[in-house]
Amino acid sequence: MIENKTNSITKDYHFYLSCSKEELGKLYRNNAIKEKRLNKKIQDMEKEIKEIEKINTLLTKAMTAKNKDINKNLTPLKETISYKSAMKYKASLSLDEQQKIINEVNDEINRKYDDE
């Protein structure tokens, strides 16, 4: 496998040696543009991951609060069927849908504790 990669790199190198200076410049610019696009995609994905982590944290807190309200502390939260079902359902939702649900749950929790 390493030999195949080495052969491929050698082949690429010989191809680049056969190119003119202008062609190499054009290839370099195109490669730089691709690299910039990929870096942008990576940054966007990292932002999305952080958003998902925030949502997961809020959902876990909301579920823990509901779990405590119902006095179901006998089973750890992550082992409950309702938690597993909620995680599967959450995975099927878009970020906007998840955020809407989180806001609704937070509003409900706030109303409940405001009433007490």
Image (cartoon, rainbow, N blue to C red):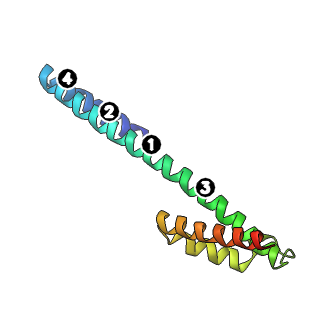
Percent coordinates x, y for residue 17 in the rendering: 20, 23
Q: Secondary structure at mark 2?
A: helix
What residue do we see at 69% from left, 79% from top? 82
Q: Residue furthest front?
A: 115
Q: Amino acid at mark 3?
A: Lys
Label 4 Cα neighbours within 10 Å, binned few <14 / some 14-19 / many ≥20: few
The answer to which of marks 2 and 1 sits earlier in the sequence is: 2
Q: Amino acid at mark 4?
A: Leu
Q: Nearer the viewer, residue 71 or 8?
A: 71
Q: Amino acid at mark 1?
A: Gln
The answer to which of marks 1 and 4 sits earlier in the sequence is: 4
Percent coordinates x, y for residue 73 in the rendering: 85, 74
Residue assigned mark 3: 54
Residue assigned mark 1: 43
Q: Amino acid at mark 2?
A: Ile
Answer whether residue 20 is visible to the viewer in this image. Answer: no
Q: CA distance from mark 2 to mark 3?
A: 42 Å
Please state which of the two labelled residues, at mark 2 or mark 1, is closer to the viewer.
Answer: 1
Residue assigned mark 2: 9
In the image, residue 81 sits, relative to residue 109, either above or below, namely: below
Q: Secondary structure at mark 1?
A: helix
